[in-house]
Amino acid sequence: MFQAVNGFVLAGVVVVTLFPFVNIVARSFSGEHEIRSGQVTLWPKGFNLTTYQNVMSDPLFWINYRNTVVYTVVATAISLVLTTCYAYVLSKHRLRGRALLVGVAVFTMFFNGGLIPNYVLVSSLELRNTLWAIVLPNAINVFNLLVMKAFFESLPTELEEAAAVDGLGTYGILARIVLPLSKAVLATMLLFYAVQFWNSWFAGFLYMDRQELFPVTVYLRNLIAGATSGTDITASSETALQVAASIQAVTIVLTMLPIMLVYPFIQRYFVSGVMLGAVKG
């Protein structure tokens, strides 16, 4: 009885979770009249690709899409390296000044300089209209840092002591002992940072002045707001109405699709046994 009820409840949760997503996909392929009249639920009505064609036929869309890929890859790599190194250091209780370093990190979770000081700082460092304006201000997420710190603290110290007896130094222990045992948390942090930078639009909107430097999220935001002429939606009244009706659904689908394609390859690390076989006896 418990398994039956549990399965029924979980199935209900899955349905409730998937319904908005399926509805958005259906709306993105539906006609303008069907969308405005509320006929679209789980299946497209009045199948239409006008909005997709208008968005994807614009060269600026692909330029901004490429920018997003570059920004996400570089920013995720840098953030993962910095977070891993910082978390590994903080996990060592014998480190002098450890409490101060932890306090500095936690302090930034609740307090920051504010929007204007951050903008002045980035401008004074001449980082505007560069990749680093997006990467550096958000290089370390403190929540991710604390998660990795707690994970490193859970690793048996005997492994590192044995590696040190065998002649490995600090970097050797980190690279050859700790990181191979940390695939699950590294994959999780990789996904968290990738999603963070992929969906980020405000940094690009704030620090970029030229359209060819925008991430795709800013391009699509401007398209929704009607603040860009990237796609000629005024070519005909029928086309304009169709784009206006389905543009939000199309932009949501286009921005979340790459993350959805990456997630299945990383998910298996979330549930894998991290310490399985690491300690014998």
Image (tube, rainbow, N blue to C red):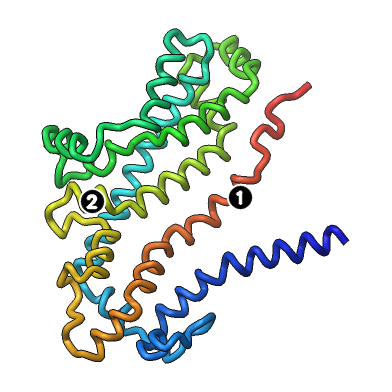
Look at the numbered disc 1 and give the secondary structure of its residue: helix
Vertical arrangement, residue 48 with respect to residue 115, above or below: below
Look at the numbered disc 2 and give the secondary structure of its residue: helix
Q: How many marks?
A: 2
Q: Nearer the viewer, residue 206 or 280?
A: 206
Residue 268 image label: 1
What's the residue at 41%, 44% (across, down)? 193
Mark 2 vs mark 1, CA separation in Å: 32 Å
Could you tell me residue 232's position as x and y percent?
17, 79
Q: Amino acid at mark 1?
A: Arg
Left or right, 54 with respect to 126, comes to right
- Quadrant of the image for the N terminus? bottom right
Q: Nearer the viewer, residue 70 or 142?
A: 142
Residue 209 image label: none
Q: Residue furthest right?
A: 1
| Residue 258 lies in quadrant | bottom left
Vertical arrangement, residue 87 with respect to residue 74, above or below: above
Could you tell me residue 129's position as x and y percent?
15, 47
| Labels 2 and 1: the sequence-earlier one | 2
Could you tell me residue 150's position as x and y percent?
56, 27
Q: Nearer the viewer, residue 175 or 44?
A: 44
Q: How crowded is the residue under tag 2: few (<14 C-alpha within 10 Å), some, or many (20+)?
A: many
What's the residue at 35%, 72% (across, down)? 248
Q: Amino acid at mark 2?
A: Gly
- Quadrant of the image for the C terminus? top right
| Residue 227 lies in quadrant | bottom left
| Disc number lying in front (2 or 1) | 2
What's the residue at 28%, 79% (across, down)? 244
Left or right, 43 with respect to 240, comes to right
Q: How crowded is the residue under tag 1: few (<14 C-alpha within 10 Å), some, or many (20+)?
A: few
Name the residue beneath numbered marker 2. 204
Vertical arrangement, residue 272 with respect to residue 200, above or below: above
